[in-house]
Amino acid sequence: MILELDCGNSFIKWRVLSALAGVLVAEGVVDSDQALIESLRSLDKLSLGKCRLVSVRTEDETNLLIGLLKREFDISVVCATPAREMSGVKNGYEDYERLGLDRWLAMLGGFHLAGGACLVLDFGTAVTADFISSEGEHLGGFICPGMPLMRHQLRTHTRKIRYGDLAAERALTSHVPGRNTVEAVERGCSLMLRGFVLTQLEMARSYWGEGFSVFITGGDAELVSDVVPEARVVPDLVFVGLAMACPLS
Ligand SMILES: Nc1ncnc2c1ncn2[C@@H]1O[C@H](COP(=O)(O)OP(=O)(O)O)[C@@H](O)[C@H]1O
Ligand SMILES: CC(C)(COP(=O)(O)O)[C@@H](O)C(=O)NCCC(=O)O
Ligand SMILES: [K+]
């Protein structure tokens, strides 16, 4: 079996595929290395052979996790690394190594699935947008705070914005003006994300008219997906790119 990991700033997304057919065996989201090991240990008939992973964490943190995986499961681990060009996509950063690897893999996955120009939007801790032309040229992108960061900033830099997770979830069932703090904040931040999406769409149209695909991924993808009905919500877009960047022979 193959273990795939997407180590973001907040969560580790994991999944286990069968070695031969690549069929999904199990998957999950965890908030620590230890929780990952526990989730995997609890699986029935787990027999991991290999692991491929992408991380936007520090080298030290990533190496710690790799060491842990090798000790626990005695597997080989392959890490996605930066590239100037891969699978027809050309990295557009001045310094290609500085582009976040999760963005790079989502771009590889998006361009592969679209077979043409695409806009890739990722809603995680940070929100990112990346533009890839029909020739596979990465035009660049944008980074801004995602929902968890916007919430956190308001909660920590004001005296009177305090509320719990359940209230936050309930507040997001509508976007009418809030009549209490939790509604006002949650809906306000959600509208910022939705406005961001519309701006990115406008920019993509100015480049490519109607000839492009939109991909939406990341843990908070559902907060914005209805703004772009034609978009493809692909929660595992980073994994699509990871398999392309790290083929396991
Ligand atoms: N099962 C889940 N576990 C944790 N967070 C989730 C889950 N489903 C959706 N989310 C949302 O995903 C967001 C984090 O997105 P994610 O793409 O995992 O971020 P990152 O890659 O930066 O770690 C959180 O704000 C949370 O609201
Ligand atoms: C932009 C990001 C913080 C997004 O991370 P995420 O929200 O997925 O955890 C990550 O891709 C990153 O650290 N990038 C390096 C900086 C850059 O892409 O320019
Ligand atoms: K991510």
Image (tube, rainbow, N blue to C red):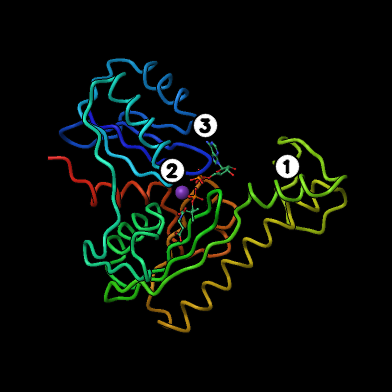
Q: Which residue is mark 2?
A: 58
Establish if 103 lies above or below 197.
above
- Ligand 2 neighbours mark 2 (CB distance < 8 Å): no
Q: Disc 3 on helix, strand or loop?
A: loop
Disc 3 C-beta below 8 A from ligand 1: yes
* Mark 2 vs mark 1: in front: 2
Which of the two labelled residues, at mark 2 and mark 3, occupies the earlier sequence position?
3
Which amino acid type is marked by label 3? Asp
Q: Label 1 sits on what residue type?
A: Ala
- The residue lying toward the viewer, choosing from 2 and 69, is 69
Q: Which amino acid lies under the numbered mark 2 shown in the image of this protein? A: Thr
Report whether the residue tagged 1 is closer than 8 Å to ligand 1.
no
* Badge 1 or badge 3: first in the primary sequence: 3
What residue is disc 3 on? Answer: 31
For residue 168, which numbered disc appears in the image? 1
Regarding mark 2 in the picture, which secondary structure is present there? loop
